[in-house]
Image (cartoon, rainbow, N blue to C red):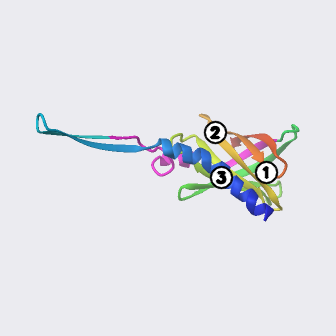
Amino acid sequence: MKTVIKNVYLVTALSLSTLTAYADDTSSNSNTTSNAGNSTSNTSTSTSNTGTATNNNSTSSILGNYQCQRTDASNNTVSYPMTITKTGDTFTFEWDSGTGDPVLYGTGVMHPNLTNVISASFWDPRKPDTIGIQMIQVKPDGSLQSNWVSQADNQLGTETCTRGK
């Protein structure tokens, strides 16, 4: 039950920023008729969504292999290779150990209005209680910068990833 509750909090936290952005991405249509001049006016205003469904150039440019430096709240740093793949509108993250074993798995979505921000959840397949969320910013040089929080011990951390060669 404890893990289920943590997962509900995790999904809620991850969803809030994305849902807020989608709520801001609205379309409105209004039709007005003027009796004085018997004229009809049709006004349509919409904002375009530049998220994953419509902007394939920015999303495909982040796919691939990275070398990441992950630093926790105690300033301990570990280095992991990470691979980003895409299925539909979601991204899959896999951090591996030096021997190729998965250390963390993650799933994320791109912010609908900012094509350089991804919200992601992650979990440790070796320790089911280790789950967390992170906000990833894609820098102009192709590197990734993120802030993350782990539910298991409420620690905040950072991660910097550079594209693999």
Q: Pointer 1: what residue?
A: 151
Q: Nearer the viewer, mark 1 or mark 2?
A: 1
Task: Mark 2 and mark 3 in contact? Answer it, CB < 8 Å.
Answer: no
Q: Quadrant of the C terminus?
A: top right
Identity of the residue drawn at 62% across and 35% down? 139
Q: Amino acid at mark 3?
A: Thr
Q: Is residue 148 visible?
A: yes
Residue placed furthest toward the bottom: 1
- Give percent across and percent down for residue 17: 60, 44
Tag count in the figure? 3
Mark 1 to mark 2: distance in Å?
21 Å
Magenta-colored stretch includes residue 51: yes
Identity of the residue drawn at 45% across and 45% down? 49
SS for callout 1: loop
Q: Is residue 108 left or right of residue 105?
A: left
SS for callout 3: helix
The residue stretch that appears in magenta? 45-71
Crowding at mark 2 (Cα within 10 Å: few <14, some 14-19, many 20+): many
SS for callout 2: strand
Depth order, front residue of 147/18 = 18
Q: Amino acid at mark 1?
A: Gln
Crowding at mark 3 (Cα within 10 Å: few <14, some 14-19, many 20+): few
Q: Pointer 2: what residue?
A: 137
Query: Which of the numbered marks, if any, corresponds to residue 12?
Result: 3
Which of the 4 quarters of the picture holds residue 158?
Answer: top right
Q: Earlier in the sequence, mark 1 or mark 3?
A: 3
Residue placed furthest toward the front: 35
- Give percent across and percent down for residue 150: 79, 48
Mark 1 to mark 3: distance in Å?
13 Å
Q: Is residue 93 visible?
A: no
Depth order, front residue of 29/82 = 29
